[in-house]
Image (cartoon, helix red, strand yellow):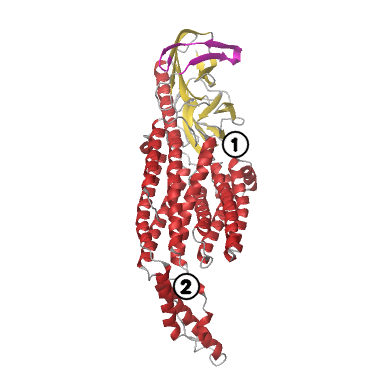
Amino acid sequence: MTLTIAPRVRALVLLLLAAACALLAAAGPASAHAAVTGSDPGQGAVVDKAPARISLTFSEQVAMSDDSLRVLDPEGKRVDTGKPSNVSGTTYAVPLHSGLPDGTYTVAYQVVSADSHPVAGAYTFSIGAPSKTSVSVSGQSADDGVVGWLYGFGRYVSYAGFIVMAGGAAFVLACWRRGSGVRPVQRFVVSGWVALTAATLALLLLRGSFTGSGKVADVFDLSLLGQVLQTKTGAALVSRLLLLAAAALFIAVLFGAYDKREDAQEKRDLTFGLSIGGVVVAAGLAASWAMSEHASVGLQAGIAMPVDVLHLLAVAAWLGGLGSLLVALYRAPADTPVDRPAVRRFSQIAFGSVLTLIATGTYQSWRQLGSWSAFTDTRYGQLLLAKIGLVVVMVGVAWISRRWTGRLAETAPVEAVAVREKERVGAGAEPAGDVATTDAGDGDAPATAHSDTDTDTDEHPGSERAAQLARQQAARDAARQKRMRDADPNRFGLRRSVLAEAGIAVVLLAVTTVLTQTEPGRTEQEAKAASSSSASASSGTGTSGALTLNMPFDTGGEDGKGIVTVDLDPARVGDNEMHVFVERPNGRAFDIPEVKVEFTLKAKDIGPLPVVPDHIATGHWSANGVQIPMAGDWQVDVTVRTSDIDEVTVSKNAQIG
């Protein structure tokens, strides 16, 4: 690949880098890849009375099955009853048996986030006092095991197949406009279609087990397949299969009627039609990823999905075209090599693709990271740094390719060498050598001619001699093709640099595949902050007797996410002192217009009892003399207003008194 960096583009690159700094410095809230941000009872908490239910709060809406929330006693027996249900917003609960004895209980969860990724985990809480338990809280991640590995490999193959198919077809249409010598690239593009189709079918079969039990035996469970087809991911995979049927027709025309068309005007018209159709099909295939993964949830999803489609199309144009160029340089017949204009046209396309990747990648990084610290503090950020490093290396190798392109000789000298070689070899060739075809030149090493004169020579001496001469001629043609391909040192240098780029691209695609399955840095940091707050609250409750409740909220507007903490001291019948703290996901104080609190004891039909605390400082409200008339399981409702129109109420139950 080649890149020609014009001076007039420098300002654009600097503007894009400045935009990256501004976006990351002023990042707002977003979400993807659900994470647990709160629980009741909290992780490691010790409660005096057995709770009536267990609730978990996630960073986004999740999909649940009957077994998504399980509560196990110290002996490993289930004590939950009924199905998990959505009690409010992103909080889900499952009821428990009444009269549970003292001991340590394990809460295990396995859900599917809105961006299609399974999320699993476990934690413990205790009733009365901690005890030994036979249940392991480490659990198996949804991405572990054979099914998880196969699913990840299928995703890699599907990305690679799309890039090869879409980028290869674009290379033929936009760069290599000659009709002859395109057969190796045709095989390359068709292999991409086959890989993408096979991977999509495999992902459909693996999906049910991947998000559920993780067992290989469940891969061919038709009931699970039926459930998958009803999900967003299943619909995306089926849509991809339908679009692949259209892609097959496109490829048939591209390497059939289009390749054979001789009239220049007709070929231009067909090129225009194929270009429009190809872009539509490729964009539809790219959308099958965008509509079901990270881009489909969180901040500015309506903008993020088109940006994600554009990002994937730019990757295909760059890396898929690079692979096609490599195939053309190595496998095309020497008498019809890829010419200098084709390489220069691809250079322009690649440069435009790189600029597009910088712009779309900056926006995606802002959405998924949100802060500079996430680059080093989260696995997603570390993988993103590795990806950026690989892209920088690829651009550096591309600069070397640009030097070779600048010195690439025209095809005339190579053709002259081809004529001389043909005259020299043809002088001593037998007429039977004409049976050798151009396809023999696809190999880089000469074939070995075997002598079969000792077998059946008396029966078919003429035909055996002709076959032997044909094999010898094929070997000579293969050797001649290789010498002709290596005759131009500039073309040989370009082949080596493009091969290096392609090798880096393979690693880059692997890192990208892992990146799409990794929890975004922003969500990971929010979950860590919520867990830390919950652990601090549990510790404080155990030592002072005061009640502390942490409740994540999202008003749905711009800058509408945060965590509200309610402290009630001494959390008993009669007068209490209440403090309310509102923080941003990064732990900083969040100054909002209004906070209201209500207490409701549903078992006794008491409440709601409203409390309007006074604003003390930034992110801090307080109220004295909060009356709790009787002990019980009180529901605490907190209404948070972040703007004139953005408001949300979050709830949590707590034993008071």
Q: Nearer the viewer, mark 1 or mark 2?
A: 2
Is residue 385 part of the magenta span, yes or no? no
Residue drawn at point x = 51 percent, y = 74 percent: 438
As measured in the structure, the alpha-carbon distance from the residue carrying label 1 to the one carrying label 2 is: 58 Å
Q: Which residue is mark 2?
A: 441
Q: Secondary structure at mark 1?
A: loop
Rendered position, 114 above or below 505: above
Residue drawn at point x = 39 percent, y = 38 percent: 15
Amino acid at circle 1: Ser
Q: Is residue 164 left or right of residue 539?
A: right
Residue 147 in view (yes/no): yes
- The segment highlighted magenta reads 592-620
Location of the N terminus (image quadrant): bottom left
- Labels 1 and 2 touching (C-beta < 8 A): no
Instruction: Please name whichever residue, 594 or 436, is drawn nearer the observer in this view of the structure.
Output: 436
Name the spot of residue 95 as percent of width and height, x first: 58, 27
Instruction: Please name whichever residue, 191 or 605, is drawn nearer the observer in this view of the structure.
Output: 191
Rendered position, 144 above or below 623: below
Tag of residue 259 = none
Q: Is residue 460 left or right of residue 542?
A: right
Name the spot of residue 556 as percent of width and height, x first: 53, 26
Name the spot of residue 373 as percent of width and height, x first: 36, 34
Residue drawn at point x = 45 percent, y = 45 percent: 356
Is residue 598 part of the magenta span, yes or no? yes
Q: Which residue is mark 1?
A: 65
Residue 110 in view (yes/no): no
Q: Earlier in the sequence, mark 1 or mark 2?
A: 1
Name the spot of residue 56 as percent of width and height, x first: 52, 29
Amino acid at circle 2: Gly
